Image: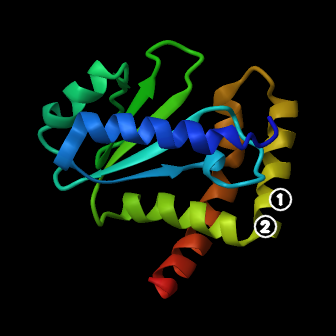
Amino acid sequence: MDHDPAWRTDADAEIEQVRDALGDLAVRIDHVGSTAVPGLAAKPIIDLQVSVATMEPIDPYGEPLARLGYLFVPDAEFSDWQFFAKPPERPRTRHLHVVAAGSHHERRHLAVRDFLRSHPDEAATYEALKRRLVAEHPEDRLAYIEGKAAYMAALEAQALSSFSSSS
């Protein structure tokens, strides 16, 4: 859907709830993903990233997130970051990524967000791809994700290169 300026307000409110629930466990909390890029069309799912000092054990952050209505979604592909979704059933309105502070995963989400914010031409290219994939696969979430994979890998590499040189 077209960008909704309310996404930022929604993200800020959710960040405050997560911050209150996690306290000092959260080194930082960021609004990431397409809803964090002004003007960029997106699925209406707010992506948040919580950076923590240590990923293990999961209970210190997993239990407070569960009390907020987040479902832990374990995945063998996510060996060095954790994924939570809210509400537990689809359609979801929140995705929350827990990453180690200073990790590659922390940097990659921030880098892509910041790159798209500062390169409107690239954001427009990404939006066109997303809209085409939705038109081609309106009911197939996995095909949509797979259709973006090569583009996202290249975008991430470019964004990380820019992020590293600006940090």
Residue 54 drawn above or below residue 110: above
Of residues 71 and 136, the one drawn nearer to the viewer in this rendering: 71
Density class for disc 2 (Cα within 10 Å; few <14, some 14-19, many ≥20) is: some
Q: Which colour scheme is used?
A: rainbow
Disc 1, SS: helix
Q: Quadrant of residue 23?
A: top left
Left or right relative to 37: residue 64: left
Residue 91 drawn above or below residue 118: above
Query: Looking at the picture, how far across and down is residue 86, in whole percent?
Result: 46, 23
Left or right relative to 86: residue 148: right
- Identity of the residue drawn at 39% across and 58% down: 105
| Residue 32: numbered disc | none
Query: Looking at the picture, how far across and down is residue 121, in whole percent?
Result: 82, 68
Density class for disc 1 (Cα within 10 Å; few <14, some 14-19, many ≥20) is: some
| The C terminus - image quarter | bottom left
- Decide if residue 31 is in sight here: yes
Query: Looking at the picture, how far across and down is residue 67, in whole percent?
Result: 27, 19
Residue 148 drawn above or below residue 73: below
- Identity of the residue drawn at 56% across and 36% down: 10
| Residue 120: numbered disc | 2
CB of mark 2 within 8 Å of CB of mark 1? yes
Mark pair 2, 1: CA separation: 6 Å
Which residue type does callout 1 highlight? Ala
Which residue type does callout 2 highlight? Pro
Of residues 59 and 67, the one drawn nearer to the viewer in this rendering: 67
Disc 2, SS: helix
Residue located beneath label 1 in the image: 124
- Identity of the residue drawn at 43% across and 15% down: 88
- Decide if residue 25 is in sight here: no
Of residues 119 and 11, the one drawn nearer to the viewer in this rendering: 11
Query: Looking at the picture, how far across and down is residue 137, in whole percent?
Result: 80, 28
| The N terminus - image quarter | top right
